[in-house]
Image: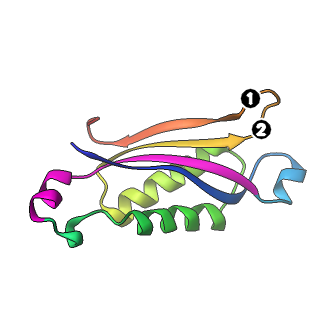
């Protein structure tokens, strides 16, 4: 299966377990790989069959902004479930990074895969 990707999508959300984290918004960065039949879209050059990158990005931003998460794992699961449901995505890989969460590290986070067989 082909993949569509969105890299480096920065979104502000309430995320963290500490009281001070619950009172502010922090930036998380998401990288997505989404299974999508690119060959069919390319053969017809039909925009209507293409995955709308902007709509996917807006939906991810909405899920993240509206949520109040303690864990990046929870954010990742919510985003994955929403994308699979809203856009009919059979498989996805999602990386959620929380920059500056650990001293000395550029970022920490999780990578999850959900759905059918890996492409």
Q: Please tell me whether mark 1 sits on a helix, a strand or a loop.
A: loop
**Mark nearer the viewer, 1 or 2:** 1
Quadrant of the snapshot with the C terminus:
top left
Residue 93: percent from left, percent from top = 42, 41
1 is higher (above) or lower (below) than 48: above
Picture layout, residue 17 above or below residue 23:
above
Taking the spot 57% from the left edge, 64% from the top edge, the residue there is 61
Tell how many labels. Answer: 2
The residue that appears at 51% across and 55% down in the rendered structure is 79
Image marks 1 and 2: residues in contact by CB distance under 8 Å: yes
Q: Residues within 10 Å of mark 2 (few under 14, many from 20)?
A: some
Q: Is residue 86 left or right of residue 12?
A: left
Q: Nearer the viewer, residue 4 or 68?
A: 4
Residue identifier under label 1: 105
Task: Kindly give the residue lying farthest to the right in the view shown.
Answer: 20
- In the rendered view, tell whether residue 27 sits above or below residue 85: above
Graded by Cα atoms within 10 Å as few (under 14), some (14 to 19) or many (20 or more), the crowding at tag 1 reads few
**Disc on res. 62:** none
The answer to whether 101 appears left or right of 52 in the picture is right
Q: Where residue 71 sits in the image (x, y, percent)?
A: 68, 44
Task: Spot the residue most to the bottom.
Answer: 48
Provide the residue designation for mark 2: 101
Q: Position of residue 108 (x, y in %)?
A: 67, 34
Q: Secondary structure at mark 2?
A: loop
Q: Nearer the viewer, residue 51 or 43?
A: 43
Residue numbers of the magenta segment: 26-44
Determine whether, in the image, residue 116 is placed left or right of residue 11: left
The residue at the point 25 percent across, 52 percent down is: 36
Cα distance between the residues tagged 1 and 2 = 8 Å
């Amino acid at each position: 299966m082909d993949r569509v990707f969105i890299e480096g999508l920065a979104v502000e959300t309430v995320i963290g377990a500490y009281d001070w984290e619950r009172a502010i918004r922090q930036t998380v960065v998401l990288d997505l790989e989404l299974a999508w039949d690119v060959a069919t879209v390319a053969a017809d050059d039909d925009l209507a069959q293409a995955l709308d990158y902007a709509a996917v990005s807006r939906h991810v931003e909405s899920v993240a902004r509206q949520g109040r998460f303690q864990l990046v794992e929870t954010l990742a699961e919510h985003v994955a479930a929403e994308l699979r449901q809203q856009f009919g995505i059979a498989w996805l890989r999602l990386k959620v990074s929380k920059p500056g969460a650990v001293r000395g590290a550029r970022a920490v986070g999780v990578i999850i895969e959900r759905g059918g067989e890996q492409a």
